[in-house]
Amino acid sequence: MWMSAFLFALLGTGVYSHQTVPDTGSTQFLIPTAGQNTGSTQISTQTKENLALRGRSVQSSTDFDWVAAHAIDSITLDSCTHTDKSNNPWWRLDLLKSYPISRVIVTNRAGWCADRLDGAEIHIGNSLENNGNNNPRCAVLNAVSLGESVSVSCDMEGRYVNVFLPGTSKILTLCEVEVYEADYMKKAFVMMKFVSSVNVTDPAVSSELLNQVTTVLTSKGLSNFTLTWTKPPQDVKQDGM
């Protein structure tokens, strides 16, 4: 859905025709601008996927209706989990199948009690022994500031991701947990046809076009992505010219 929107914002003109390209799933846009040369190309957008959004979560107990799912709802700070005060509270994410995991990001609560997360352990594995808390440990969290998101590298494999807080009379609160697969990139493609007053086959020009698209996508809130040409810009004959 964002593809036509970013082209409109980039070129400052309406898209007067677009269609799905057969057998490719790409979307073709015809953009009217001033000039003689027409170029056609594809852009590959690669974005890391947050695997946590695919999963299901549970926790050892729930207080204030701050349920386990609040940690995987893509809402940071204003939507958090909260266990009862108990011994060794935990939160567990079930990814539904095993993945190679490269990185886990945990966001602490804002407002007060930042130190409640001190000593929390991240465990990853495929066992449900001790509610998954006996799986290999990736990291221990300490001194995470209010509202801070801390990223830890794991390079482990597993279906279950646990945040386990050892100790007596503890409360575990998480505002967001993100999980990213090792070397996994989600790709999207867009095919563009446009009329340009400059030579789009010039590598410097095509590179600048990617830079402009990147700037627009970033301004729209998209992050963690790269743009590459899967087919370099080419001049094609335009009817009537």
Image (spheres, grey):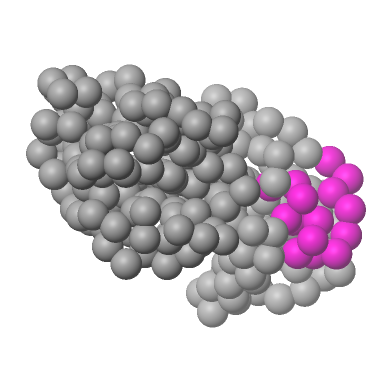
- Position of 116 with respect to 79 (left or right) is left
Q: Position of residue 113 (x, y in %)?
A: 45, 58
Q: Position of residue 175 (x, y in %)?
A: 49, 47
The kind of secondary structure the magenta stretch mainly shows is helix
Which picture quadrant has residue 198? bottom right
Residue visible at 25% across and 29% down in the picture = 160
43 and 177: which one is in front? 177
198 and 117: which one is in front? 117
Q: Is residue 15 magenta?
A: yes
Q: Is residue 202 above or below residue 106?
A: below
Residue visible at 56% across and 33% down in the picture = 64
- Position of 184 with respect to 126 (left or right) is right
Q: Is residue 172 above or below residue 196?
A: above
Q: Position of residue 199 (x, y in %)?
A: 65, 74
Q: Is residue 54 magenta?
A: no
Quarter of the image for the C terminus: give it: bottom right
Q: Position of residue 216 (x, y in %)?
A: 68, 65
Residue numbers of the magenta segment = 3-17
